[in-house]
Amino acid sequence: MWAAPDRDYIGCMAEYAEGPGAEDAGVAVRLTARVQGTVQAVGFRYWTVRKAEELGLRGTVRNDDDGTVAVVVEGPQAVVLQFRSWLRSPDAPGRVDRVEEQISPATGAFSNFRVVY
Protein backbone atom coordinates (compact mmCIF):
# COMPACT_ATOMS: atom_id res chain seq x y z
CA MET A 1 0.00 0.00 0.00
CA TRP A 2 2.72 2.52 0.94
CA ALA A 3 5.67 2.83 -1.41
CA ALA A 4 9.19 3.40 -0.19
CA PRO A 5 10.27 7.04 -0.38
CA ASP A 6 11.80 8.15 -3.64
CA ARG A 7 15.05 9.39 -2.10
CA ASP A 8 16.41 10.85 -5.33
CA TYR A 9 13.34 13.03 -5.85
CA ILE A 10 13.29 14.18 -2.24
CA GLY A 11 16.98 15.04 -2.54
CA CYS A 12 16.17 17.06 -5.64
CA MET A 13 13.47 18.88 -3.69
CA ALA A 14 16.02 19.95 -1.08
CA GLU A 15 18.47 21.07 -3.75
CA TYR A 16 15.84 23.09 -5.59
CA ALA A 17 14.63 24.73 -2.42
CA GLU A 18 18.06 25.71 -1.15
CA GLY A 19 20.57 26.06 -3.97
CA PRO A 20 21.08 25.99 -7.70
CA GLY A 21 17.78 25.48 -9.47
CA ALA A 22 15.83 27.33 -6.76
CA GLU A 23 13.73 28.84 -9.54
CA ASP A 24 12.12 25.38 -9.88
CA ALA A 25 11.01 25.40 -6.21
CA GLY A 26 7.53 26.47 -7.31
CA VAL A 27 6.84 23.22 -9.18
CA ALA A 28 3.75 21.60 -7.61
CA VAL A 29 4.30 18.26 -5.89
CA ARG A 30 2.32 15.83 -3.76
CA LEU A 31 3.59 14.41 -0.48
CA THR A 32 1.81 11.25 0.66
CA ALA A 33 2.84 10.31 4.19
CA ARG A 34 1.98 7.87 6.94
CA VAL A 35 2.95 9.20 10.37
CA GLN A 36 3.66 6.66 13.11
CA GLY A 37 4.03 7.21 16.83
CA THR A 38 1.74 8.79 19.41
CA VAL A 39 -0.25 10.74 16.83
CA GLN A 40 -3.87 9.96 17.63
CA ALA A 41 -5.89 11.58 20.44
CA VAL A 42 -3.30 14.39 20.72
CA GLY A 43 -4.75 16.91 18.24
CA PHE A 44 -2.34 15.87 15.49
CA ARG A 45 -4.90 16.13 12.67
CA TYR A 46 -6.11 19.56 13.71
CA TRP A 47 -2.59 20.99 14.12
CA THR A 48 -1.73 19.48 10.74
CA VAL A 49 -4.66 21.32 9.16
CA ARG A 50 -3.56 24.54 10.85
CA LYS A 51 0.04 24.18 9.61
CA ALA A 52 -1.05 23.29 6.06
CA GLU A 53 -3.40 26.29 5.93
CA GLU A 54 -0.66 28.56 7.31
CA LEU A 55 1.59 27.41 4.45
CA GLY A 56 -1.18 27.64 1.82
CA LEU A 57 -1.16 23.90 1.07
CA ARG A 58 -4.06 21.69 -0.02
CA GLY A 59 -4.86 18.08 0.85
CA THR A 60 -6.21 15.83 3.58
CA VAL A 61 -5.33 14.24 6.90
CA ARG A 62 -7.03 11.26 8.58
CA ASN A 63 -6.61 8.77 11.40
CA ASP A 64 -6.16 5.18 10.24
CA ASP A 65 -7.32 2.12 12.16
CA ASP A 66 -3.73 0.98 12.76
CA GLY A 67 -2.98 4.06 14.91
CA THR A 68 -1.16 6.00 12.20
CA VAL A 69 -2.14 9.28 10.58
CA ALA A 70 -2.31 9.54 6.78
CA VAL A 71 -1.45 12.88 5.17
CA VAL A 72 -1.71 13.92 1.54
CA VAL A 73 -0.53 17.44 0.78
CA GLU A 74 0.03 19.34 -2.45
CA GLY A 75 1.71 22.64 -3.20
CA PRO A 76 4.94 24.23 -4.40
CA GLN A 77 7.80 21.85 -3.68
CA ALA A 78 9.69 24.35 -1.51
CA VAL A 79 6.61 24.77 0.71
CA VAL A 80 5.89 21.03 0.78
CA LEU A 81 9.50 20.58 1.93
CA GLN A 82 8.83 22.98 4.83
CA PHE A 83 5.69 21.03 5.74
CA ARG A 84 7.60 17.74 5.52
CA SER A 85 10.22 19.11 7.95
CA TRP A 86 7.48 20.21 10.35
CA LEU A 87 5.98 16.69 10.34
CA ARG A 88 9.29 15.35 11.65
CA SER A 89 9.98 18.17 14.10
CA PRO A 90 9.26 18.48 17.82
CA ASP A 91 6.73 21.18 16.86
CA ALA A 92 4.32 18.51 15.59
CA PRO A 93 1.94 17.38 18.36
CA GLY A 94 2.30 14.03 20.07
CA ARG A 95 5.40 11.99 19.35
CA VAL A 96 6.36 11.20 15.77
CA ASP A 97 8.48 8.05 15.62
CA ARG A 98 8.56 7.54 11.88
CA VAL A 99 7.24 9.08 8.66
CA GLU A 100 6.87 6.89 5.58
CA GLU A 101 6.57 9.12 2.55
CA GLN A 102 6.30 9.30 -1.18
CA ILE A 103 6.71 12.33 -3.42
CA SER A 104 4.94 12.54 -6.78
CA PRO A 105 3.67 15.22 -9.15
CA ALA A 106 0.65 17.15 -7.83
CA THR A 107 -2.72 16.24 -9.32
CA GLY A 108 -4.65 19.36 -8.35
CA ALA A 109 -7.34 17.19 -6.76
CA PHE A 110 -7.78 19.37 -3.64
CA SER A 111 -9.40 22.77 -3.17
CA ASN A 112 -8.39 23.16 0.51
CA PHE A 113 -6.85 21.21 3.39
CA ARG A 114 -9.19 19.25 5.64
CA VAL A 115 -9.68 16.33 7.98
CA VAL A 116 -11.34 13.33 6.34
CA TYR A 117 -12.91 10.37 8.11
Image: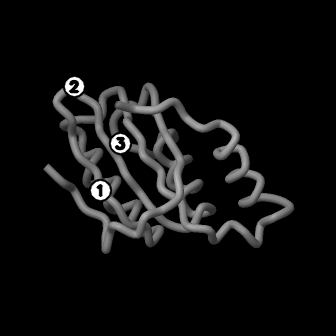
Q: Do the CB atoms of the residues marked 1 and 2 lie less than 8 Å apart?
A: no
Q: How many neighbours does mark 2 have within 10 angstroms: few (below 14), some (14-19), or many (20 or more)?
A: few
Q: Residues within 10 Å of mark 3 (few under 14, many from 20)?
A: some
User: Which residue, given by chain and number where applicable, does mark 1 sit on?
Assistant: 60
- Depth-wise, is mark 3 or mark 2 nearer the camera? 2
Q: Residue at x 18, y 54 (%)?
A: 116
Residue at the (53%, 58%) spot, across then down: 105
Query: Residue 92: which numbered mark, if any?
Result: none
Q: What SS does tag 1 mark?
A: strand
Assign the N terminus to one quadrant of the image. Answer: top left
Spatial CA distance of label 1 from label 2 is: 18 Å
Residue 66 bears which disc, if any? Answer: 2
Q: Amino acid at mark 1?
A: Thr
Q: Position of residue 22 (x, y in %)?
A: 77, 66
Give the residue drawn at x 16%, y 30%: 65
Return the disc, 1 or 3, that comes first in the chain's sequence.
Answer: 1
Task: Name the one closer to the observer, 108 or 62.
Answer: 108
For the residues carrying marks 1 and 3, which lies nearer the camera in this image?
1
Find the distance from the CA under tag 1 to the CA under tag 3.
17 Å
Q: Tell me how far mark 3 sits from mark 2, CA to CA.
A: 18 Å
* Label 1: few (<14), some (14–19) or many (≥20) C-alpha neighbours in 10 Å: many
Residue type at mark 3? Answer: Pro
Secondary element under disc 2, as helix, strand or loop, is: loop
Quickly name the residue at label 3. 93
- Judging from the image, the colouring scheme is one colour
* Residue 39 position (above or below residue 18): above
Identified at 43% across, 25% down, the residue is: 97
